[in-house]
Amino acid sequence: GAVVSQHPSRVICKSGTSVKIECRSLDFQATTMFWYRQFPKQSLMLMATSNEGSKATYEQGVEKDKFLINHASLTLSTLTVTSAHPEDSSFYICSAEKAGTDTQYFGPGTRLTVL
Amino acid sequence: DAKTTQPTSMDCAEGRAANLPCNHSTISGNEYVYWYRQIHSQGPQYIIHGLKNNETNEMASLIITEDRKSSTLILPHATLRDTAVYYCISNFGNEKLTFGTGTRLTIIP
């Protein structure tokens, strides 16, 4: 199998607070993980690429100081939304590339609502 | 990544085969064709991928034309749970995926 989990699945926070989202590959190692964001009725948009033990690579227009990514192990990457604002409310999805394959497997997503 | 084009939406009767087309006329020789689907409010689910040869797994079959400019994903016996947005993506592997708008497949009872 190739199972990816995310925690939490849903979070509501106040404006100005920080929220951390975890992405774990449960039954495989992932040297590379990706973070996507999806707004209602839109497709997934890549935010950043995260490689284990190195700094993440951010897509154009994504603020690296606002969306902090840590990929400390081959099975865990975290995304921290700092000083969240209502416009950050979205569906955040991670994927993990299974080592030795060319295939990414996605987590179930985290729905963030900032009040 | 080569650009792919898919129909915006399709309907298919339950129990029938669902055939989802994808055009990727600018695909390069080393790019794979990947298919994912996204059921409402869930993360995308990997279905299948291929390079040149047709592929089959427990979920679907992938038919790639000889010139590799197009492909068809086949769900052999569609069920209501197959209702989802299906994404066709060309990719070299080991790199980010670029999602288009996909095809919204609705399975009709």
Image: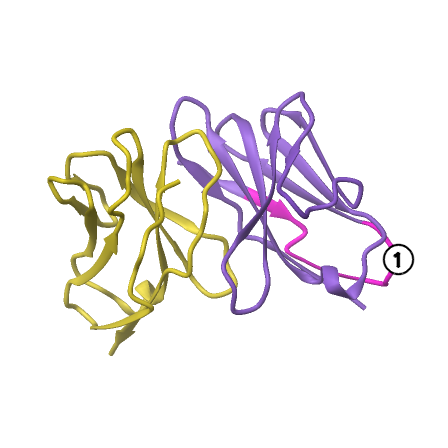
Chain colours: A purple, B yellow
Residue under the point 30% across and 60% down:
B6
Residue under the point 74% across and 45% down:
A63
Residue under the point 15% across and 39% down:
B54
Residue A16 within the magenta-colored segment of the rendering: yes
**Which residue in the rendered view is the most extreme toward the front?**
B26
Which picture quadrant has residue B75?
bottom left
- Name the residue type under label 1: Gly
Give the structural element (helix, strand or loop) at label 1: loop
Quadrant the N terminus of chain A occupies: top left
Q: Position of residue A51 (x, y in %)?
A: 60, 26
Q: Is residue B9 above or below residue A77?
A: below
Please report the bounds of the magenta region as a residue range.
A5-18
Q: Is residue B70 above or below residue A89?
A: above
**Which residue in the rendered view is the most extreme toward the left?**
B66
Residue A46 within the magenta-colored segment of the rendering: no
Q: Chain of mark 1?
A: A
Which picture quadrant has residue A31?
top right
Residue under the point 66% across and 31% down:
A56
Name the residue tied to disc 1.
A16
Q: Is residue A108 above or below residue B12?
A: above
Please indicate whether residue B85 sits to the left or right of residue A6 in the image.
left
Q: Is residue A54 above or below residue B21?
A: above
**Which residue in the rendered view is the most extreme toward the right?**
A16
Q: How many marks?
A: 1
Q: Position of residue A8 (x, y in %)?
A: 68, 51
Quadrant the C terminus of chain A occupies: bottom right
| Crowding near the residue tagged with mark 1, few <14, some 14–19, many ≥20 C-alpha atoms within 10 Å | some
Please indicate whether residue B85 sits to the left or right of residue A41 in the image.
left
Q: Position of residue B18 (x, y in %)?
A: 19, 63
Q: Position of residue B79 (x, y in %)?
A: 25, 66
